[in-house]
Image (cartoon, rainbow, N blue to C red):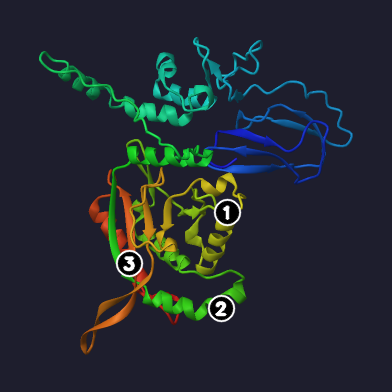
Amino acid sequence: MGESIEEATITNWFVKEGDMVEEDDILLEIATDKVDSEIPSPVEGVVKKIFFKQDELVAVGTVIAVIGLDGDDSSSTDEKPETVVKEDGVDPEPDAPDEKKSDAPVVSSQGRFYSPLVRTIAGKEGVSQEELDSIEGSGLNGRVRKEDLLNYLEQRGAAKPVQAEKTVASAPGSQPSPKKEAVQVPTMEGDEIIEMSRLRKLIADHMIRSKQTSAHVTNMIEVDVSGVVSWRNRVKEDFLKKEGVKLTYLPVFLEATVKALRDFPQINASVDGDNIILKKNINLGIAVSLPDNNLIVPNIKDAGALNLTGLTKKMNALASAARSNNLNPDDISGGTFTVTNFGSFQNDIGTPIINQPEVAILAIGAIKKKPAVIETEMGDMIAIRQKMWLSLTYDHRIVDGALGGAFLKRLGDYIESFDPHAGNFKL
């Protein structure tokens, strides 16, 4: 599995016990909090035992099935691995718990089931069993998910001041604060109710958590991209014939972004408590719109090591894999900075939400012809130029306005310095 992935849900088995499989045949489909993946068979053989059913949540590293090779008469396929969490909240081995395994799933005195990941986080953060039992879970049958616990920990940090406010409100002569309830949305005849997909729910949780975590501020700048447009129009046909992929404007902007991130490494960073982590590699996330109107952000690993052609090919490959549901978990983990292209929808300006745990995200607007004042040796003149807006949203906890503004200005300078004849940046 990819970096940071600790558990996955089996969403579908394509084989059953006794089936013959070839190497690379698809065995099952799994879903994590990041991406869905199809898992191929590493060998040719017979499926002797399947330990987990559809919709079961399994910890990474757990044996989920046994495939027997020719001549393999192993009899060790009857014991089911211990590290499993069932979505229905039932202990898979209630009669034979392994008390020695510290990372085993735990059922509380109230009969509530917790995954190893949730128990680990609770232990590190000092969350008592009573607190854990009080958390409202968003998983199947009320199971507490990682996101539920993290949201609880964020709110717990503000518990004392909240209590103080309640005490003041309850002073003599004052009215107690009314309890906030979920907003009831009225429906009318003819309204259509559509349940959110699993991916849309994950996106919603991710966006809300980002706004609750980071202090969002957005700076904007308009840049002249006439040189980029002129160069791309001149070379796009030859590029397609030579490299086999279409050349868009975006790879040029990605290359400029890499150069700016090298100049301002504080933007290519993450926050871990009171520590700022400056990332060594630039893993450039590219927001990809999917056919079902959802969004996913695969990232180009070590984008700083790629030239314009390499960025173009890698970007196209990731976008194609995303739209055909063929991304690997590692493709969407480990990003350090994200770029989203509003211009593909002919939008001018936007204020994107930071992709946690990154500290900034860049939005690129549509390229449009505009009248502009040009300084020449003969004086100022008005000309038609190709213009585009850039928006940088950053985490104001660690990125001040001066730093965010300087980074955005440097990025704009790189783009405006692009030489349409040489196909590179003059700066």
Where in the figure is residue 89, as x and y percent of width and height?
A: 57, 20
Looking at the image, residue 155 sits to the left or right of residue 38; the answer is left
Query: Dot 1 lies on which element?
Result: helix
Number of marks in the rendered image: 3
| Label 1 vs 3, first from the N-terminus | 1
Q: Which residue is mark 1?
A: 323
Kind of residue sitting beneath label 3 = Gly
Quadrant of the drawing holding the N terminus: top right
Query: Dot 2 lies on which element?
Result: helix
In which image quadrant can residue 147 be found?
Answer: top left
Query: Dot 3 lies on which element?
Result: helix
Counting other residues with Cα less than 10 Å from the Cα at mark 2, is it few (<14), some (14-19), or many (20 or more)? few
Looking at the image, residue 171 sits to the left or right of residue 8; the answer is left
Q: Which residue is mark 3?
A: 412
Q: Which residue is mark 2?
A: 237
Where in the figure is residue 91, as x and y percent of width and height?
A: 61, 17
Where in the figure is residue 397, as x and y percent of width and height?
A: 28, 43
Residue at 40%, 36% in the rendered image: 188
| In the foreground, 383 or 307 | 383
Counting other residues with Cα less than 10 Å from the Cα at mark 3, is it few (<14), some (14-19), or many (20 or more)? many
The residues tagged by marks 3 and 2 sit, at their Cα atoms, a distance apart of 27 Å
Contact flag, marks 1 and 2 (Cβ < 8 Å): no
| Label 3 vs 2, first from the N-terminus | 2
Kind of residue sitting beneath label 1 = Arg
